[in-house]
């Protein structure tokens, strides 16, 4: 089992920055990939960014590319999402996700991830 716990959400104005953190514990491995998804009211959960462990590469949704950065600490015990130039449309609950058997073709699919945090609310006012 793996446990994920997000923190760092809040209410900010458009143009501001926030950094989300996700503490990862439990049964991780050298193949555990870590990702961020988000879900706005009335919408489906959508992919934001992933750190794909097999190559160490990062991938982003087009809507956040150039503004958000996913990173981790050296031990892969914490994954971060640095969010800059926030927009009102970034308002959502942000979830950390993890999976140890993720394949490249599935990185954008929430159904491919076995472990999830409880989420942290990010609200961007205009």
Image: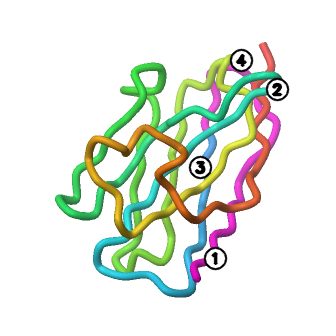
Q: Residue at x 68, y 62 (%)?
A: 117
Label 3 element class = strand
Q: State whether residue 47 is above or below residue 107.
A: above
Q: Start and end of the magenta stretch? A: 1-17
- Residue density around tag 4, few if under 14, some if 14–19, many if 20 or more, within 10 Å: some
Label 1 element class = strand
Q: Earlier in the sequence, mark 4 or mark 2?
A: 2
Q: Earlier in the sequence, mark 3 or mark 4?
A: 3
Label 4 element class = helix
Q: CA distance from mark 4 to mark 1?
A: 30 Å
Q: Position of residue 66 (x, y in %)?
A: 37, 26
Q: Earlier in the sequence, mark 2 or mark 3?
A: 3
- Residue density around tag 3, few if under 14, some if 14–19, many if 20 or more, within 10 Å: some
| Quadrant for the N terminus in the image | bottom right
Which label is found at residue 41? 2
Give residue 122's quadrant in the image: top right
Magenta run includes residue 5 = yes
Which label is found at residue 19? 3
- Residue that protrudes farthest toward the bottom in the picture: 26
Which label is found at residue 3? 1
Tell whether label 1 touches label 4 (CB within 8 Å).
no
- Left or right, 37 with respect to 103, comes to right
- Residue that protrudes farthest toward the front in the picture: 111
Q: Position of residue 120 (x, y in %)?
A: 76, 50
Q: CA distance from mark 1 to mark 2?
A: 25 Å
Q: CA distance from mark 3 to mark 4?
A: 16 Å
* Tag in front: 1 or 3: 1
- Left or right, 106 with respect to 86, comes to left
The residue singled out by tag 4 in the image is 88
């Amino acid at each position: 089992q793996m446990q994920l716990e997000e923190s760092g959400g809040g209410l900010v104005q458009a143009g501001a920055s926030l950094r989300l953190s996700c503490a990862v514990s439990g049964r991780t491995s050298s193949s555990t990939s870590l990702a961020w998804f988000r879900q706005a009211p009335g919408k489906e959960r959508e992919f934001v960014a992933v750190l794909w462990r097999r190559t160490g590469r990062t991938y982003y949704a087009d809507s956040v590319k150039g503004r958000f950065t996913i990173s981790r600490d050296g031990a892969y015990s914490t994954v971060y999402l640095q969010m800059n130039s926030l927009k009102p449309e970034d308002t959502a609950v942000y979830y950390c996700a993890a999976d140890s058997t993720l394949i490249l073709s599935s990185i954008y699919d929430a159904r491919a991830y076995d472990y999830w945090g409880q989420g942290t609310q990010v609200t961007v006012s205009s």
